[in-house]
Image (spheres, helix red, strand yellow):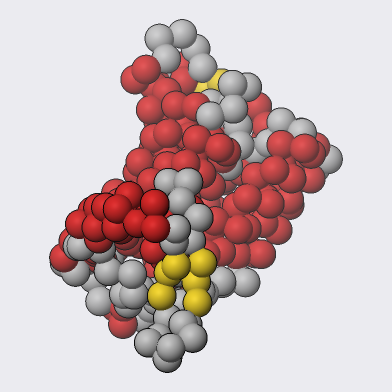
């Protein structure tokens, strides 16, 4: 069947038949096309001699952590509170490069809890639930959320270096891109599996890059924060994969969750006061 497709691509008509004489399956071509058909099949065999059509895919399974819904509820709660209870919080907590340089470092964290409007919030919650939920299923709930949170903060901090003018920003998109980076880093574990492992590694990272291009390069967003968050997530994912799964899903994961909650509460308290 493969050979029949090869001949078809070369404009050679071929019939797949098991043969009336009991000789087995074969391809029947007009006599005039036989030399060209034979040459095409030989070239096809030579070009694909190192390709394994059947090979084991080292897939660890599909795991989605539904505890990511708590993260979505936190974003919604801060958005509602910032527009009803504490109307000063969007100003006190947003990313303000001049204020950060003046010492209000917590803004690189609290800016991820704020959104410009409901559409902005809905977009980040939707993609965040998808990317972060999968990352949490792979690395552990606490470790994945903490890594993505730090990646988002790094994205906000990048503006201090590359934006010469005062820069303002809000949104969890840098953290969402950090979650995407964590997902793209999963295939690093295949690096030691030889040629096909390296191909799967490259494919996994390129898939993450393509998703980043699709969702992270909108002209009306902070592309620098998105890119830095994605790259930081990719790096942190590679570091987390160095540790055994039992370590990632045990006390370390719980400690990371406690650290994340503490960091979130402390920076929010600083912004409120």
Residue 22: percent from the left, percent from the top? 42, 91
Residue occupying the point 37% across, 17% down:
162
Residue occupying the point 19% across, 62% down:
50
User: Is residue 204 positioned above or below 102 on the image?
Assistant: below
Q: Which of 12 and 258 lies nearest the eye of the viewer? A: 12
Q: Which of 101 and 134 lies nearest the eye of the viewer? A: 134
Which quarter of the figure is the C terminus placed in? Answer: top right
Q: Is residue 180 left or right of residue 233?
A: right
Residue 19: percent from the left, percent from the top? 46, 82
The image quarter in which residue 42 lies: bottom left
Residue occupying the point 40% across, 30% down:
157
Residue at the far top: name it: 165
Residue 255 in sight here: no
Q: Which of 219 and 240 lies nearest the eye of the viewer? A: 219
Q: Is residue 94 left or right of residue 248?
A: right
Residue 23 in sight here: yes
Q: Is residue 115 left or right of residue 246?
A: right
Q: Which of 130 and 12 lies nearest the eye of the viewer? A: 12
Residue 71: percent from the left, percent from the top? 62, 59
Q: Is residue 191 left or right of residue 21?
A: left
Residue at the far front: name it: 31
């Amino acid at each position: 069947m493969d050979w029949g497709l090869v001949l078809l691509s070369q404009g050679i008509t071929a019939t797949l038949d098991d043969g009336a004489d009991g000789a087995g399956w074969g391809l029947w071509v007009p006599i005039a096309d036989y030399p060209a058909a034979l040459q095409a099949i030989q070239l096809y065999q030579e070009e694909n001699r190192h390709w394994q059509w059947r090979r084991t895919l080292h897939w660890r399974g599909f795991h989605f952590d539904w505890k990511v819904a708590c993260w979505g509820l936190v974003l919604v709660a801060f958005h509602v509170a910032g527009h009803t209870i504490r109307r000063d919080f969007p100003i006190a907590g947003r990313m303000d490069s001049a204020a950060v340089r003046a010492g209000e470092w917590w803004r690189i964290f609290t800016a991820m809890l704020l959104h410009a409007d409901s559409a902005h919030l809905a977009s980040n919650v939707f993609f965040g639930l998808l990317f972060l939920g999968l990352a949490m299923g792979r690395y552990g709930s606490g470790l994945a959320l903490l890594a993505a949170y730090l990646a988002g903060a790094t994205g906000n901090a990048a503006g201090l270096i590359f934006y010469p003018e005062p820069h303002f920003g809000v949104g969890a998109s840098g953290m969402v891109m950090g979650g995407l980076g964590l997902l793209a880093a999963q295939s690093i574990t295949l690096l030691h599996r030889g040629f096909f492992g390296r191909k799967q590694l490259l494919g996994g990272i390129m898939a993450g890059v393509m998703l980043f291009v699709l969702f992270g390069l909108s002209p009306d967003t902070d592309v620098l924060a998105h890119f830095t968050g994605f790259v930081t997530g990719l790096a942190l994912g590679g570091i987390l994969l160095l540790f055994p799964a039992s370590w990632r899903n045990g006390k370390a994961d719980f400690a990371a969750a406690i650290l994340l909650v503490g960091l979130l509460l402390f920076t929010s308290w600083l912004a409120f006061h």
